[in-house]
Image (tube, coloured by chain):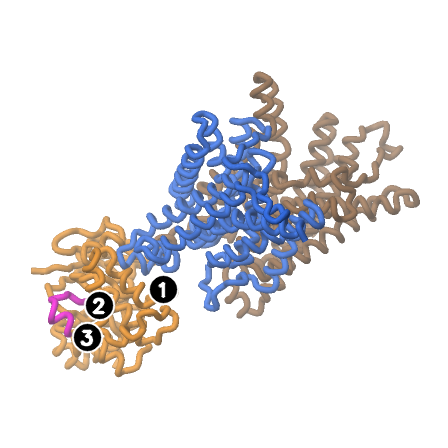
């Protein structure tokens, strides 16, 4: 069965040619799927359209068989979708604790909220040491950690990640991806991971989807994708 | 050259039109001409640089006081054309200095701050008139120009003042038109579009904003001089908040950035209150008294809201047809492009 | 010296009202990134409602409650009906619509109620207490101070200690991120307007009994002074609004007392000009200010 799917999705800006052209994609329950492709392939646009931040021109976004197309971003999130956008979307004016509580607000009430926040600190120990620090004082790695923790604290069923490794040190990246894989295995979370860091992404993913100019040109098990030099050359640039 | 010719033709046509009007209408026309000069300055400022001034009435007042002071100083000794020119020089100097000061502030401030500062300026004007040597509430008298003898058989004094008003306004607005369509206008649009990009292209935003304010202030000051010519006095009461907001209304209704629109807007803000008040005299006295002066303001407010919500190009864009899809900046400020970004922001 | 103490204490009460109104401007600025130039006109509509209610019922308190409710409703209605429909790319359309709204509301009030000043009676005496032979605050001024302090304290608690406050702050700082965390941002914006205009209405309700009387322009000067206060304190800083409000209130009280009443607006204008030119972000602006 498939929890999360795009059906004939078309997205574009203004009057220009569509960035995503009639894309169909099914992501099975609990799968970790790497979304690969060069700059401008449409990865970010696809994730933003999934959350309703960019309006779709046509097609559907399905979650558990329900069409999300008519729903606002807030309501999609409340159906179990979570997006960690590119560029460490920490609210700089709020503290670490407030950022995490904000993430938990709609999902948990009362003591359960405190428990969920504490669980996030256990998952990301460096954050626990900086509870009271304002968002703008965090390092790049801490911000990305906080953004991921804040998304997970709401127990989403589908997690969309946009370039979590961008601009981070390799060690931090492997730590983040490790937590991601463990969480997915432990909770059965479905993950769609957009990355330029192909090796890193394929190392945690079951499957890889390659986007080029708004269309899916390959959809295969991660291992076979990593081993195909022709594909790597053509679309991933190495 | 084509611009000068066009300006001369429009000016002559306006002067010819005064023959078709009775003295009161000619007085109104003179007022509208003064308002037009100020609104033209304001509409270029707001439409091209995006800076909202709520204080253009004070710039008009400064021009009026400058005119009165300079013209009165030479009134006894000089022939009338020289008195007029000296007065206009005084008006340009006074409004120019104030405009330069505000422009220096504007260069450092973003939208709402500048609007608030100019608003405070309007509110402080009556106090300033009392504290500074400006004659308090009575204000200052300005010289009276009788009809020259050669014309006295032909026209009445109101028509003569309308001629002077039209000529002064034409002289104030024509350079503004040239400025708007020339390099300076391009720089202003560049700064409005993206200050950083403008800076990278060698345009200094602070200089452009200060210059734009100055270029907008001087026509406003000359407009103030026109009103002083028509009424022979300058008093703070005439340049309050209500009048200042009317100038904004005229610019918005006409379409921000459009000089032709400014002309339409100016005629409307002078003529409509009078029409409405005339109509209000027909209803019972008590209600009529309440409607006088208020109904017109209510209508203007409603129109401004409606125009901003529905028709960002103003009335001028209705007359010239559809809003062009080539999108000049003035059409872009309010709505179309922004629809996209509001979707992502909200 | 006696005169100084008297001017200082009345300046304090005036400053509290100013701070409250400035706080209302800060709230709506933080919620929606607009300076609401119609704040005074909207607040005065609420005062007229309170006036009518008090006249009909004979109770000051019923009028006060009704006025606050009308202010809150008006704030929500203006946001839903007008401001939401505008693009937010530049502040210009919002400012222009607010100006249109000022004209509609003020002339509407003048048509409905007539232009005359209607005296409003304060609920407490305005005769100052005399302590050690020195006249200080009047009971009404004390009431104003206590009310303003209580409301500002309650707002501070709401914003910093409750989850609603957390949502309001997050929606103001980072609308898109907040939506991704399930915060209903449009609702938060409406709520910000509601709180803001209710606060402004309270400030106007406290002010008008000490002035010449209720008229459509009764809060114009309050708005200009409060705007100056909000700018001096920094539009993003509630604490700045409080400190600058007290400061400007005392300053204009002293200038009125020692120079003349007509010099006070000039003093405020001069202060505004100096602060804007030296520190455009306000005296209390945070180091890493977010761009509008």
Foreground residue among C129 and A45: C129
Q: How far apart, in angstroms, are the residues tagged by discs 2 and 3?
A: 16 Å
Asked if both marks, 3 and 1, belong to the same chain, the answer given is yes
Residue on which the image places disc 3: A179
The residue segment tinted magenta is A182-193
Tell me where residue B185 appears, x and y as whole percent: 60, 57
What color does chain C have in the rendering? blue
Residue closest to the far front: C132
Residue annotated with mark 1: A94
Q: Residue at x 47, y 58 (%)?
A: C239
Using the image as rendered, state which of residue C283 and residue B340 is in the foreground.
Answer: C283
> Is residue B332 among what the camera can see?
no
Please tell me how crowded label 3 is: few (under 14), some (14-19), or many (20+) other residues with Cα within 10 Å: some
Residue wearing tag 2: A118
- Give coordinates of residue B23: x percent, y percent: 74, 27
Chain corresponding to orange in the figure: A
Q: Chain of mark 3?
A: A
């Amino acid at each position: 069965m498939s929890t999360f799917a795009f059906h004939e999705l078309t997205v574009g800006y203004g009057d220009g040619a569509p960035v995503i052209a009639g894309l169909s994609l099914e992501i099975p329950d609990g799968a970790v799927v790497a979304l690969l492709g060069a700059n401008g392939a449409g990865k970010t646009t696809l994730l933003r359209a999934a959350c309703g931040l960019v309006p779709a021109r046509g097609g559907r976004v399905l979650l558990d068989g329900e069409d999300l197309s008519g729903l606002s971003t807030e309501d999609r999130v409340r159906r179990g979708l979570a997006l960690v956008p590119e560029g460490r979307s920490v609210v700089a004016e709020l503290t670490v604790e407030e950022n995490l509580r904000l993430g938990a607000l709609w999902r948990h009430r009362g003591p359960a909220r405190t428990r969920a926040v504490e669980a996030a600190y256990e998952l990301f120990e460096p954050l626990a040491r900086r509870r009271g620090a304002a968002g703008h004082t965090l390092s790049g790695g801490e911000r990305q950690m906080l953004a991921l923790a804040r998304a997970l604290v709401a127990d989403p069923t589908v997690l969309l990640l946009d370039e979590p490794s961008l601009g981070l040190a390799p060690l931090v990246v492997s730590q983040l991806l490790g937590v991601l894989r463990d969480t997915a295995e432990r909770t059965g979370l479905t993950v769609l991971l957009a990355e330029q860091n192909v090796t890193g992404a394929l190392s945690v993913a079951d499957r890889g989807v390659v986007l080029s100019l708004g269309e899916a040109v390959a959809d295969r098990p991660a291992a076979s994708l990593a081993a195909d030099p022709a594909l790597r050359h053509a679309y991933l640039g190495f | 050259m084509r611009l000068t010719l066009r300006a001369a033709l429009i000016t002559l046509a306006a002067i010819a039109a005064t023959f078709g009007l009775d003295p009161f209408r000619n007085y109104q026309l003179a007022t509208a001409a003064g308002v037009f000069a100020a609104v033209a300055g304001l509409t270029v400022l707001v439409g091209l640089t995006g800076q909202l001034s709520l204080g253009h009435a004070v710039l008009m007042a400064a021009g009026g006081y400058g005119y009165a002071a300079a013209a009165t100083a030479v009134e006894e000794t000089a022939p009338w054309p020289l008195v007029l020119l000296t007065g206009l020089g005084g008006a340009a100097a006074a409004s120019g200095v104030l405009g330069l000061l505000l422009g220096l502030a504007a260069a450092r401030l973003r939208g709402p701050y500048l609007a608030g500062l100019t608003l405070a300026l309007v509110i402080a004007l009556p106090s300033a008139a009392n504290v500074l040597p400006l004659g308090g509430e009575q204000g200052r008298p300005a010289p009276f120009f009788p009809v020259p003898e050669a014309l006295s058989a032909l026209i009445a004094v109101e028509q003569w003042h309308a001629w002077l008003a039209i000529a002064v306004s034409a002289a104030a607005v024509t350079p503004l038109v040239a400025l708007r369509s020339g390099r300076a206008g391009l720089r202003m649009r560049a700064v409005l579009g993206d200050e950083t990009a403008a800076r990278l292209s060698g345009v200094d935003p602070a200089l452009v904003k200060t210059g734009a304010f100055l270029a907008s202030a001087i026509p406003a000051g000359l407009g103030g001089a026109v009103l002083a010519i028509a009424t022979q006095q300058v008093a703070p009461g005439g340049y309050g908040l209500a009048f200042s907001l009317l100038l904004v209304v005229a610019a918005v209704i006409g379409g921000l950035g459009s000089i032709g629109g400014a002309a339409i807007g100016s005629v409307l803000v002078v003529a409509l209150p009078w029409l409405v008040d005339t109509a209000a005299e027909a209803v019972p006295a008590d209600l009529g008294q309440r409607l006088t002066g208020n109904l017109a303001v209510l209508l203007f407010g409603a129109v401004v809201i409606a125009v901003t919500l529905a028709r960002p190009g103003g009335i001028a864009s209705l007359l010239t047809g559809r809003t062009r899809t080539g999108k000049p900046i003035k059409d872009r400020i309010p709505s179309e492009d922004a629809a996209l970004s509001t979707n992502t922001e909200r | 010296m006696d005169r100084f103490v008297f001017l200082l204490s009345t300046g304090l009460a005036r400053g509290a009202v100013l701070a409250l109104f400035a706080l209302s401007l800060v709230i709506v600025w933080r919620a929606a990134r607009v300076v609401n130039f119609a704040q005074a006109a909207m607040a005065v509509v609420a005062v007229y409602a309170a006036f009518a209610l008090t006249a009909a019922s004979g109770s000051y308190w019923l009028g006060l409650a009704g006025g606050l409710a009308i202010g809150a409703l008006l704030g929500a209605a203006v946001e839903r009906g007008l401001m939401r429909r505008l693009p937010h790319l530049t502040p210009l359309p919002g400012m222009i619509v607010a100006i249109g709204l000022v004209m509609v509301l003020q002339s509407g009030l003048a048509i409905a109620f007539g232009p005359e000043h209607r005296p409003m009676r304060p609920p407490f005496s305005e005769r100052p207490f005399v302590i050690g032979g020195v006249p200080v605050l009047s009971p009404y001024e004390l009431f104003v101070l206590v009310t303003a302090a209580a409301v500002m304290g309650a707002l501070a608690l709401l914003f910093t200690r409750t989850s609603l406050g957390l949502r309001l702050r997050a929606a103001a700082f980072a609308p898109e991120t907040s939506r991704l965390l399930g915060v209903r941002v449009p609702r938060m914006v409406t709520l910000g307007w509601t709180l803001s205009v209710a606060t402004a209405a309270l400030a106007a309700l406290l002010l008008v009994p000490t002035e010449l009387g209720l008229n459509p322009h009764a809060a114009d000067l309050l708005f200009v002074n409060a705007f100056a206060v909000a700018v001096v304190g920094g539009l993003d800083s509630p604490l700045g609004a409080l400190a600058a409000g007290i400061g400007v209130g005392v300053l204009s009280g002293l200038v009125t007392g020692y120079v003349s009443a007509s010099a006070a607006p000039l003093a405020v204008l001069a202060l505004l000009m100096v602060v804007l030119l030296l520190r455009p972000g306000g005296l209390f602006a945070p180091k890493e200010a977010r761009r509008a």
